[in-house]
Image (cartoon, rainbow, N blue to C red):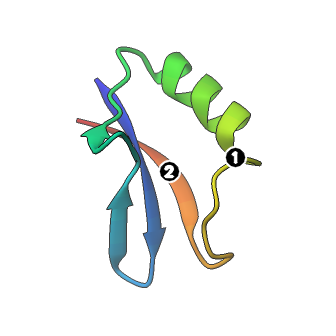
């Protein structure tokens, strides 16, 4: 299981939808979502998105 995390200066934010953490079964599913959503997600420029294994 994988999740997408936004990281900046020791602050970690778990990406969620409707207050539910988004969990992906495979790395490829998480990567696909990350690539599609990168332009849509509104995050400060100092945040980096990362895929983490749970």
Quadrant position of the N terminus in the picture: top left
> Could you say which disc has been placed on residue 18 in the image?
none
From the top left corner, tell me how far across and down residue 23 is, in percent. Answer: 32, 28
Seen in the picture, residue 12 relative to 22 is either above or below; the reply is below
From the top left corner, tell me how far across and down residue 24 is, in percent. Answer: 38, 22
Q: Are marks 1 and 2 in contact (CB under 8 Å)?
A: no
* Mark 1–mark 2 distance (CA, rounded to whole Å): 11 Å
Mark 2: which secondary structure? strand
Q: Earlier in the sequence, mark 1 or mark 2?
A: 1
Quadrant position of the C terminus in the picture: top left
The furthest residue to the front: 18
Q: Check disc 2 and report the residue beneath it.
A: 50
Q: Check disc 1 and report the residue beneath it.
A: 38
The furthest residue to the left: 54
**Left or right placement of residue 37 versus residue 12 in this view:** right
Residue at 35% across, 15% down: 25
């Amino acid at each position: 299981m994988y999740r997408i995390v936004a990281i900046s200066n020791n602050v970690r934010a778990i990406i969620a939808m409707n207050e539910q953490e988004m969990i992906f079964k495979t790395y490829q599913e998480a990567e696909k979502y990350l690539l599609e959503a990168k332009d849509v997600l509104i995050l400060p420029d100092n945040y980096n998105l990362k895929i983490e294994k749970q």
